Amino acid sequence: MPGYNNQKQLRRFVSRNLNRVGAKTTRIDNFMAGDLRANSDCATTTLFPSMAFFFFVSNSIGTIYRAYYLRDYYTVGFVLFEYSAFLLLHLCLTAFHKLPSQDGTKWRKFLQLAIWVLYSAIVFGFSAYFSPLFGDPYCGYSLYVVSVAGSVLLFYVYVIWDGSKSGCDERLGEEKMREIKIQVY
């Protein structure tokens, strides 16, 4: 495939060649902007999360060691709680995004509630730990207000409003779709 300077030339090339194979609808994944989510063969899709987990683990171990050495058991419990809740949230989000969007099973509902509960626990844990550092009680309460607002918003998005039932799905209707992925360097 020859090099193309802009999106218009690329779309023209794809539409011309799609007529040969008889595709009705097409979705073009363009990786020019650095969208690495759809490219499962790329090493960076697992490299960056792995690096983030490594830094998260090393910082957590360092914080736990320092807090235990200073006999600050409240901080040890906080870090252990937040780390375990974060890992469970990551596992639940991964399992939730692997499910088909049209799936209405109890497992999907359980994952939606688990995501909401874990997120709320993480946010309220941070609020409880850091609100005394503000000094003024009203500033500390504002942190709780932000936590409640975020929790309510996430509850609405993941539990009440389900995007798969509102017509916001990638697939349009019942027509068959042929996906063509084009990687532009």
Image (cartoon, rainbow, N blue to C red):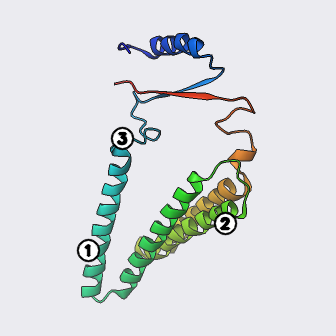
Mark 1 Cα-neighbour bin, 10 Å: few <14, some 14–19, many ≥20: few
Quarter of the image with the C terminus is top left
Report the side of 52 relative to 161 (left or right).
Answer: left
What amino acid does circle 1 point to? Gly
Residues 15 and 134: in front is: 15
Above or below 43: residue 138: below
* Residue kind at label 3, given as amino acid type: Cys
User: Which residue lies at the image location 69% right of the left edge and 46% below the top edge?
Assistant: 163
Would residue 10 be found to the left or right of residue 57 on screen?
right
Q: Residue at x 40, y 74 (%)?
A: 133
Residue 70 sits in which quadrant?
bottom left
Give whichever of 18, 5 is nearer the camera: 18
Q: Which residue is mark 1?
A: 62
Q: Secondary structure at mark 1?
A: helix
Q: Quadrant of residue 20?
A: top right
Circle number at residue 42: 3
Marks 2/1: CA–CA distance:
34 Å
Q: In which quadrant will I find the N terminus?
A: top left
Q: Can residue 129 be seen by looking at this rendering? A: yes
* In front: label 3 or label 1: 3
Residue 68's spot in the image, x, y percent?
29, 86
In this view, the residue in front, 4 or 157, is 4
Which is nearer the N-term, disc 3 or disc 1? 3
How far is mark 3 from mark 1, CA to CA?
32 Å
Q: Position of residue 52 (x, y in %)?
A: 34, 57
Q: SS class of the residue under badge 3?
A: loop
Task: Give the Cα separation between the discs numbered 3 and 2.
Answer: 31 Å
Q: Is residue 46 above or below residue 36?
A: below
Q: Is residue 15 above or below residue 161?
A: above
Mark 2 sits on what residue?
110
Give the residue type that dot 2 points to: Phe
Give the number of the disc on residue 163: none
